[in-house]
Image: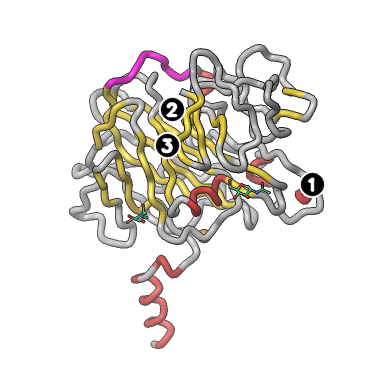
Amino acid sequence: MFKQVVALALMAFPQALAHGGVLSIAIGNTWYNGWAPYDSPTGQTTIIRPWSSYNPIQDATDPTLSCNDDGTSGALQLTAPITAGEKITAYWNQVWPHPYGPMLVYMAQCPGTTCTGVNSDTLSWFKIDESGLINGTIYDGFWGDGLMIADNSSWTTTIPSTIPNGPYLIRFETIALHSLPAQLYPECAQLMVTGGGSLAPTTAELVKFPGAYSNTDPGLTVDIYSNAAQTETTYPIPGPPLYGSNGVTSTPASPSGPSSTSSVPTTSISSSAPSSTPTGPVVPEYGQCGGIGFTGSTTCASPFKCNVVNAYYSQCY
Ligand SMILES: *[C@@H]1O[C@H](CO)[C@@H](O)[C@H](O)[C@H]1NC(C)=O
Ligand SMILES: *[C@@H]1O[C@H](CO)[C@@H](O)[C@H](O)[C@H]1NC(C)=O
Ligand SMILES: [Cu+2]
C-alpha cells in the first residue's frame, strides 16, 4: 500500500526524476505552453507535438526518435506562425540536470499545407543548429548542454532565412553523455514559415529519424570518463552536416589548420585561439563565429557578417 502511494506521487511529480523535455516555446513575445505528457491527451491544444515520457531514448533505432512519441498528432494540434530569420526558444524543465553532451536542432518540411496529421517518422529532417564540446576536454569540458542550462535551461535558435516557405516541424534535441547508452531527449513543434527563401536542403543534409544516428556513432558512444577523454578536445556531433554547409561535415580544426582539403566552408568545433589574421576555415551562414569560450574561426563565409547574439554566442548571417 505504501509503495503504491509512493509510485503515485512519482507519477504526479515526474519532474522529481532527473529527466524531462521541452515544456514550452517562445517566439518573439508569444509564449506557447507545451504538451503535458503526464496529463490525458484529450483536449490538449499546443504547438508542441504530443510526447509521452520524461525518460530518455537510449537506442538510435528507437521508433519514437523523431518526436518522442509514435509520430502522430491529434486534430487539436496547433501551428505557430514564424518568419524566416526569426528566433525561437525552447524551454526545458528547470534546472536541466545533464550538462555533458551536445544540443541539436532540426527542421523538416511537411508535404501539403499543414503538418497536422503528418507522421513525423515519414519526414526528411535537416539540421539547423548544433553545439557540441565548446571548450576543454571530453572529460571535464564545457558543452552545448551546459550552455543550455546556463541560459535558463533554454535554447534559442534562428530559423534560417533561406528555407522555403511552408509548414515545418522543428525538433529540439539535447543529448546527455554522463552515462551510456547516451540519453536522447527530442521534442517537436509545428511551425508555418513565411518570408523564407529558396535554398532547399541538399540530399546530403536530409535524414530520417530513426536513421540519422547509429548506435555506433562516436558521438553517442564516447565514454567521457575514460583516460582518452581526459586529453581529447574534439567531439564529433552526431547527425548530418548543417543545412547550408554544402554537404560538408563539421570538421574540427587542428592547430596546423583545417584537416579538410575541401575549398567549401567548414565549421570549426574546437581549434587553437584565433589569431589577429585568421587563416582557419571560414564559418558558413548560421555557424558560430564567437562568444565566451569559443575558440574556433571568427571569419564568416562571404557575404555574411559575424553578429553577437549573446555573450556566449555570435553567429554568421
Ligand atoms: C526562465 O524560464 C522559465 C520557463 O522555464 C520562464 O518562465 C522564465 O521567464 C525564464 N526566465 C528568464 C529570465 O528568461
Ligand atoms: C568554457 O566556456 C564557458 C562558457 O562559455 C566559460 O564559462 C568557461 O570559463 C570556459 N572554460 C575554459 C577553460 O575556457
Ligand atoms: Cu535525466
Instruction: Report the amino acid beneath label 1.
Output: Thr
Count of marks, rendered view:
3
Q: Nearer the viewer, mark 3 or mark 2?
A: 3
Give percent across and percent down for residue 11: 37, 70
Give percent across and percent down for residue 240: 56, 29
For the residues labelled 3 and 2, say whether their Cβ atoms are less than 8 Å apart: no
| SS assignment for the magenta stretch, majority | loop
Quarter of the view holding residue 239: top right
**Residue designated by label 2:** 124
**Residue designated by label 3:** 157
Quarter of the view holding residue 67: top left
Comes first in the chain, label 3 or label 2: 2
From which residue to which does the magenta span run? Answer: 195-201
Secondary-structure class at tag 3: strand
Vertical placement of residue 93 versus 236, above or below: below
Comparing 311 with 139, the one in front is 311
Q: Residue at x 47, y 67 (%)?
A: 17
Give percent across and percent down for residue 46: 24, 47
Give percent across and percent down for residue 256: 79, 25
**Residue designated by label 1:** 231
Secondary-structure class at tag 1: loop
Q: Nearer the viewer, mark 2 or mark 1?
A: 1
